Image (cartoon, grey):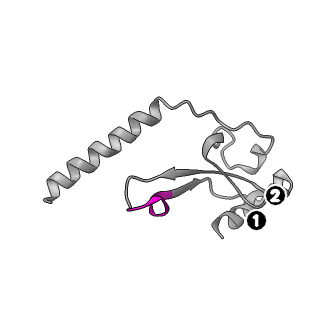
Amino acid sequence: MELSKLVRSTSNRIMSEFRKLSHSSMKPMITQFYSMDIYSDIHPFKETAIFCGPESDPAENRYINANRICSIYGEDAQENLIIAAQGPIDSSLRNFWKMVH
């Protein structure tokens, strides 16, 4: 495939994904742990939130401001998975590295 067609195709796919997001019904997750975020006005979405550790762990030990995002690249679901997260601060550093691991 020539480069210009590839660029045009990729651009169309990105715009299609963006249009889906702009009409998304996803709601921000309401939590008491915003003090663990760098930016207190940017919240993870409930539907795609990442949690670190088993549900039996206390919530503050599992919270990280991060979401799963499906990429338009890759052959299968594992290759398409991207995680978007805020950088950690002191209070969320342990959870951040649990997520990375």
The image shows residue 21 at horizontal and vertical percentages of 46, 36
Q: Amino acid at mark 1?
A: Arg
Q: Which residue is mark 1?
A: 94
Residue 22 in which image quadrant = top left
The image shows residue 58 at horizontal and vertical percentages of 86, 54
Residue 79 in which image quadrant = bottom left
Q: Which mark is residue 51?
A: none
Q: Which residue is mark 2?
A: 61
Residue at image coords 39%, 34% = 19
Q: How many marks?
A: 2
Front in this rendered view, residue 66 or 71: 71
The image shows residue 67 at horizontal and vertical percentages of 60, 50
Q: Residues within 10 Å of mark 2 (few under 14, many from 20)?
A: some
Q: Amino acid at mark 2?
A: Asn
Residue at image coords 69%, 38% = 29
Do the numbered discs 1 and 2 sit on residues whose CB atoms are within 8 Å? yes
Question: Of helix, strand and loop, which one carries label 1?
Answer: helix
Residue extent of the magenta highlight: 75-81
- For the question of whether residue 45 can be seen, the reply is no
The image shows residue 12 at horizontal and vertical percentages of 27, 42
> What is the distance, in whole Å, between disc 1 and disc 2 at their CAs?
8 Å
Residue at image coords 75%, 43% = 34
Whether residue 72 is situated above or below residue 47 in the rendered picture: below
Name the side, left or right, on which 49 lies relative to 94: left
| Front tag of 1 and 2 | 2
Name the side, left or right, on which 24 lies relative to 56: left
Q: Which residue is most to the bottom?
A: 101
Q: Is residue 33 magenta?
A: no
Q: Is residue 77 magenta?
A: yes
Name the side, left or right, on which 96 lies relative to 48: right
Q: Quadrant of the C terminus?
A: bottom right
